[in-house]
Image: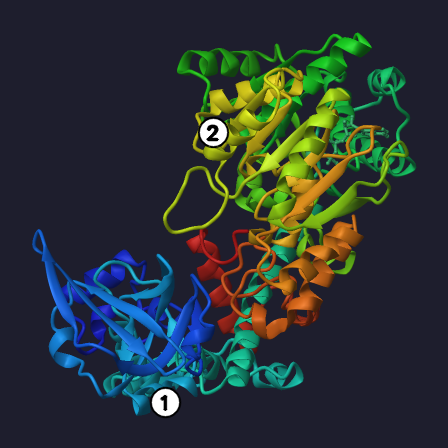
């Protein structure tokens, strides 16, 4: 048996279990082993009932004050009692667990664990888990894995199967040299596996073995050993990702193209027609782009610049230069709203500068007929500039002469999507634009397949955004402030975390909020809402009206987060700001301060803990995306962040670009060294490495397709 073997080669896994596992994507023994817990719980010491917070998972220790009463409503049973620890009392209820009545007695001390809820003036815990003292004590000293389970699966099922495999794990590094040994291993029903990392490398980078790491992920001995395991597996993930990047880079460095592109004046004419002067950084990056467009090699370049640094105009300049040479250029955005906005501003720029090129918008929400027409114009070469969403890379999209592909807010797109788009032409030039706050040292590694240009300068007319971090009592003042700004001719955004009211989450929602603020503001101020569940057409329509200042106050979810540009908006009010990550808040704030008027960002938090205010205060003092990300990391510390995705910007399974930045550097060092010594991975000690890499590549969707 090896990691590729089907699940039913394990003992005790019948058809039913096999099927359950399959629905969770577990098909082989290897899948099972790498079905890592999504989090770990450590059971905390019981808290005193009088201090219990509301709406949090708590543990209490006490005795039932009354015997359990079962009541039946339409076939459903509700069991009720109360628990006291001397300091206070909480209500306990269970649904459809009538047997609790017989299993729990008054006069015996139990431990209950569950989420608190307010019920009138009292606190209630529903469906509490029940433990005896000794039982619970054992739990407080260990980390409990939490798996993502699909219906019917249980933790026990996963752990039992994993345990069986772990017990039979046998390294096959030697066995693969020797067929007999492998056969013997198979006879013994051992699971053979190979640690692709030679011991020498493991020692050099202080990494534990793969088997040890996997075992600790499922059954951690301690927080330390879990971290060690995580480090090793994060290394693996980075390692194969970087190996893939090296491959891509090498591949493209050999690529030449047959485009003849020369600057013939269109870009200069557009620059001359702009109401502003390009910043020094924009001029420098434009020079990079122009040089490469005119060069012999295929360009693959990342433009990295904080929100508002003016990336769009560079895209337009490049698209125009391609167009004036008779080729086509495509600009792909992650959302319809953003694509429509780019389309509008490009049309305006074309008009304003009197340039004769035709642009076209192509999005998923267009009717089949509209799309057909668009495709026809692309194929005939009638349009030179195509702007859109994913629709740009769908099979039906055929280009006449595609020479340049630009993707905006690149971290939302996968490398694969980029590759697909590139296949639409004879290897067109590629530009990706991103505001992702990554320090340059990491960007150089993570975008190793790209050349990088940095826009490190903001347009000069920008006044720094004024920020404030306040509690909910400040809301009326914030609304007054919005009213005043609107009277000065400006516009405002209000961000709420939720679309509609929810029983589960206590946070502001767009629908109710819109009604409330509408009532509070004078009737001539037009308030509208925007959220992700609206149809793309409706969203575009609302954004269009906001852009034309027909709407003054836009209440929205985070759908406006990426790239939206309404320079006349000067207020960003973020409700429940504590529910968002700092990087996201920074992106949201980037929606204002885009014109020459003073802009304001108000972070309104739920006002519970001082820690939240402290964290938000980072935003108060910095407008720099890189710095914010770094400080956020510092303030939270690795313990708290364990298993929490800080960046979420690259889809690694376990690794996190920020938190595992040191491991990323090591993996990069290792890959660079190995490739220098053995570019084809043909040495015997790299055989397993190569096999794993090939397997991952064939799986495509897996770990390396970022
Ligand atoms: P981002 O880099 O976040 O994509 P945009 O390209 O949307 O930023 O630019 C933000 C705003 O700044 C736009 O309204 C744009 O017209 C304006 N802008 C771009 N470059 C300059 C400049 N050099 N001087 C003044 N305003 C500029
Ligand atoms: Mg942008």
Q: Are marks 2 and 1 in contact (CB under 8 Å)?
A: no
Between 105 and 408, the one nearer to me in the picture: 105
x, y (%) of residue 397? 50, 23
Label 2 and label 1: CA atoms lie apart by 55 Å
Quadrant of residue 494 in the image?
top right
Q: Quadrant of residue 10?
A: bottom left
Q: Which mark is residue 394?
A: 2
Disc 1 designates what residue?
Answer: 138
Is 557 rendered above or below residue 94? above
Q: Is residue 408 above or below residue 527?
A: below
Number of numbered discs visible in the structure rendering: 2
> What residue appears at the point 80 percent right and 28 percent down from the top-left corner?
595
**Can I make out residue 434 in this image?**
no
Image quadrant where residue 173 sits: bottom left
Q: Is residue 19 left or right of residue 405?
A: left
Location of the N terminus (image quadrant)? bottom left
Circle 1 SS class: helix
Ligand 1 falls in quadrant: top right
Toward the left, the furthest residue is 75
Report whether residue 626 is seen: yes
Does 168 appear above or below 406?
Answer: below
Residue drawn at (63%, 19%), measured in percent from left and top? 525
Residue 616 place in picture, x, y as percent: 68, 55
Colour convention of the picture: rainbow
**Which of the two residues, 187 or 527, is positioned nearer the viewer here?**
527
In front: 389, or 539? 539
């Amino acid at each position: 048996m090896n990691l590729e073997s089907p699940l039913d080669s394990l003992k005790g896994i019948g058809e039913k279990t096999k099927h359950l596992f399959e629905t969770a994507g577990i098909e082989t023994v290897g899948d099972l082993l790498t079905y890592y817990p999504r989090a770990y719980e450590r059971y905390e010491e019981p808290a005193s009932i009088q201090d219990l917070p509301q709406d949090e998972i708590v543990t209490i220790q006490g005795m039932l004050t009354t015997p359990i009463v079962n009541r039946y409503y339409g076939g459903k049973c509700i069991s009720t009692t109360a628990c006291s620890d001397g300091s206070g009392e909480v209500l306990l209820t269970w649904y459809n667990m009538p047997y609790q009545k017989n299993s729990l007695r008054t006069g015996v001390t139990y431990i209950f664990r569950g989420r608190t809820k307010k019920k009138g003036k009292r606190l209630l815990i529903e469906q509490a888990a029940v433990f005896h003292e000794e039982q619970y004590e054992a739990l407080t000293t260990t980390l409990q894995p939490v798996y993502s389970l699909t219906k019917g699966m249980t933790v026990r099922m996963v752990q039992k199967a994993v345990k069986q495999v772990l017990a039979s794990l046998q390294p096959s590094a030697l066995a693969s040299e020797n067929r007999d040994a492998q056969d013997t291993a198979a006879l013994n029903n051992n699971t053979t596996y190979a640690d692709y990392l030679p011991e020498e490398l493991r020692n050099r980078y202080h990494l534990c073995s793969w088997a040890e790491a996997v075992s600790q992920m499922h059954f951690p001995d301690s927080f330390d050993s879990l971290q060690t395991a995580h480090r090793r597996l994060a290394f693996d993930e980075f390692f194969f990702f970087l190996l893939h990047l090296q491959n891509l880079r090498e591949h493209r460095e050999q690529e030449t193209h047959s485009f003849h592109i020369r600057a013939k004046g269109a870009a200069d004419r557009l620059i001359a027609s702009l109401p502003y002067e390009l910043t020094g950084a924009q001029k420098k990056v434009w020079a990079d782009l122009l040089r490469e467009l005119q060069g012999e090699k295929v360009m693959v370049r990342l433009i990295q610049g904080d929100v508002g640094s003016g990336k769009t105009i560079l895209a337009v300049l490049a698209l125009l230069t391609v167009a004036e040479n008779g080729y086509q250029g495509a600009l792909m955005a992650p959302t319809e709203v953003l694509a429509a906005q780019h389309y509008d501003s490009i049309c305006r720029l074309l008009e304003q500068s009197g340039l004769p090129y035709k642009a076209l918008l192509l999005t998923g929400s267009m009717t089949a007929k509209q799309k057909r027409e668009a495709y026809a114009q692309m194929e005939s070469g009638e349009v030179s500039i195509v702007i859109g969403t994913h629709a740009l890379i769908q099979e039906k999209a055929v280009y006449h002469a595609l020479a340049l592909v630009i993707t905006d807010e690149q971290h939302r797109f996968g490398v694969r999507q980029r590759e697909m788009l590139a296949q639409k032409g004879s290897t067109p030039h590629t530009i990706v634009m991103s505001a992702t706050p990554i320090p340059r040292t990491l960007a150089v590694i993570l975008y190793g397949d790209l050349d990088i240009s940095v826009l490190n300068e903001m347009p000069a007319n920008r006044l720094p955004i004024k920020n404030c971090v306040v509690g909910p009592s400040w809301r009326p003042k914030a609304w007054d402030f919005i009213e005043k700004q609107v009277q000065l001719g400006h516009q405002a955004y209000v961000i709420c975390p939720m679309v509609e009211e929810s029983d589960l989450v206590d946070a502001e929602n767009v629908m109710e909020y819109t009604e409330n603020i509408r009532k509070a503001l004078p009737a001539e101020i037009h308030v509208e809402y925007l959220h992700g569940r609206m149809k793309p057409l409706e969203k575009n329509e609302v954004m269009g009206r906001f852009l034309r200042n027909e709407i003054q106050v836009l209440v929205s979810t985070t759908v406006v987060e990426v790239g939206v540009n309404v320079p006349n908006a000067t207020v960003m009010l973020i409700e429940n700001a504590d529910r968002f990550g700092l990087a996201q808040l920074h992106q949201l704030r980037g929606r204002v301060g885009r014109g020459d008027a003073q802009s304001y960002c108000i972070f309104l938090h739920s006002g519970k803990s001082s820690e939240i205010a402290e964290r938000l205060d980072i935003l108060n003092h910095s407008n720099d995306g890189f710095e914010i990300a770094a400080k956020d990391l510092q303030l939270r510390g690795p313990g708290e962040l364990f298993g929490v995705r800080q960046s979420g910007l690259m889809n690694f399974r376990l690794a996190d670009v920020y938190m595992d930045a040191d491991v990323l550097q090591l993996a990069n060092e290792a890959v660079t060294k190995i490739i220098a010594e053995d570019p084809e991975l043909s040495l015997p000690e790299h055989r397993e490495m190569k096999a794993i890499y090939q397997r991952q590549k064939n799986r495509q969707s897996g770990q390396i397709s970022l």
